[in-house]
Amino acid sequence: MSVVMTPKSVKGNSYLKVTQKFPFCKGCGHHQITKAIDGALVRLNLDPRNINITSDIGCVGLVDSLFQDVHSLHTTHGRSTAFATGVEIADSILGDSKLKNLVVIGDGGAMIGLLHLVNAAQLNVDVTVILYNNFLFGMTGGQNSSFSPLGFVTATTPGGNIVPPVNIIDVLKGANAGFLARKTATDADLAEIIADAISYPGFALVEVLELCTEYALRGNVIRGNKLAELGAGPTADLGIIVNRHDRKELGVVYKEKLKVQKEETKGVGIEPRYENALEKKTGFIIAGTAGERVQSAAYMLVQAAVLSGANATQKNDNPVTQGTGFSTAEVVLSREKILYTGIDVPDVVVVVSEDGVKDLTAKGVFDATNDESLIIADETLVIPSCRGRVLRQPLRRKYLPEGAAFAGILTAVKTTGILPPLAFQDVAVSQKRAEELLSILEHVMGEI
Ligand code: SF4
Ligand SMILES: [Mg+2]
């Protein structure tokens, strides 16, 4: 996306590049629809710096480049609405919410990316989709699309299409879309309807029925005034079909919810009560077997660190089958804000089972240790050669498999002195297994 300063002359006249001719075939409906989009922008007198046109693949993919000074994004086939949805969410939630996001997509792209349209309608993002529906894939040789009417002759349906077309308006009605219109490319009020769609605060789609003169006329006899009858069957509605205002657009709802949540959670959270002795950002890698409370022990380390005024992050890992195999957690502690949650060189490794050793070996954790690393391992384990200080402890034998990871973490904390035992006591007291955890704490740390 590029930002270009706007020449004043663009506003009020046309947003199209004056020097560039339309590249479309003679008689193609893309001419009228693109001009109608321009007409809509002129009516709304939008600052081009606040317009983003996202185009799809096909002849319609040439449309965004015809406009001057607007932002533009040319995307992969069918995905234009998803890209625009992302841009819109970023702008409405993180930005100043000034951007008007337009999508230009053909019936081929709409068919390929149908769920992106459904999703955008469901979310009610402020994205306006102009669907150039010429009932076939134009650019690739005139093949049948999901929008081809019954009986329509295309390159892939030479005997006439036998599958009824998708009614996109009905599909998106079912996804709670707020603004839906169906027009033909020759309608005099097309620009006005597109302007209404762009002004609509939320998801809007205008399906515009048109002809691909290159392919549609080869096997079909279509008169201009019969074009409307082709779109989703002879009984399909034309004009503005849905224009409801009972939903707020996503950015507004999200911000309102965030405000309420901030109010509700004011004062909630862990207030530091102790001091930590962290001298640097410290990375713990704790590994064991699923079901043996490895990740919950890591979370107690995080809580004790926060209680001691540190920042902390935790990332867990386990196999797809959650309840079997290894269970690993990476915890980073720091006095500073943690902007990188990876651990390139582990400061502390706690490993309490064979599964844990296998996982850490596969991940290269032992190879990544250095002379400063501290490795706390259960006494029964054979660990690969590594640098640093290795402390073997009877963790499983003394504290049982469910207490081994917690005991290993406490051993590391005691050895390094980075966090006060009292913080762990406060955390342990609040757990369901308080008695068991306090007993481990006392054994490892001694009298607190
Ligand atoms: S191939 Fe069809 S859709 Fe593409 S520019 Fe030509 S007439 Fe228009
Ligand atoms: Mg098409």
Image (cartoon, helix red, strand yellow):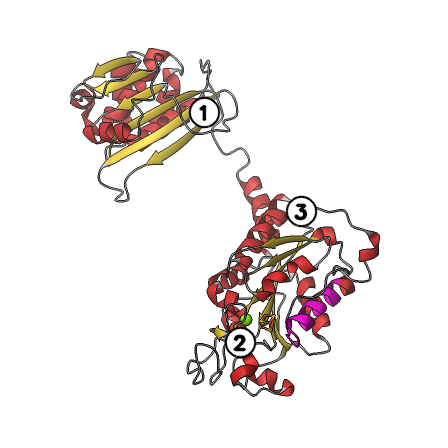
Circle 1 SS class: helix
Circle 3 SS class: loop
- Residue drawn where x is 34% and y is 28% of the image: 298
Marks 2 and 1, the one that precedes in the sequence: 2
- Residue drawn where x is 38% and y is 21% of the image: 345
Please tell me in which quarter of the rendered image ligand 1 is found. Answer: bottom right
Q: Residues within 10 Å of mark 3 (few under 14, many from 20)?
A: few
Residue 233 drawn at (x, y percent): 52, 83
Q: Mark 2 points at which residue?
A: 135
Q: Name the residue under label 1.
A: 306
Q: Residues within 10 Å of mark 2 (few under 14, many from 20)?
A: many
Tell me: residue 438, above or below residue 123.
Answer: above
- Which residue type does callout 2 highlight? Phe
The boundaries of the magenta stretch are: 25-41
- Residue drawn where x is 22% and y is 40% of the image: 324
Question: Between marks 2 and 1, how big is the CA–CA gap?
Answer: 60 Å
Q: Mark 3 points at which residue?
A: 2
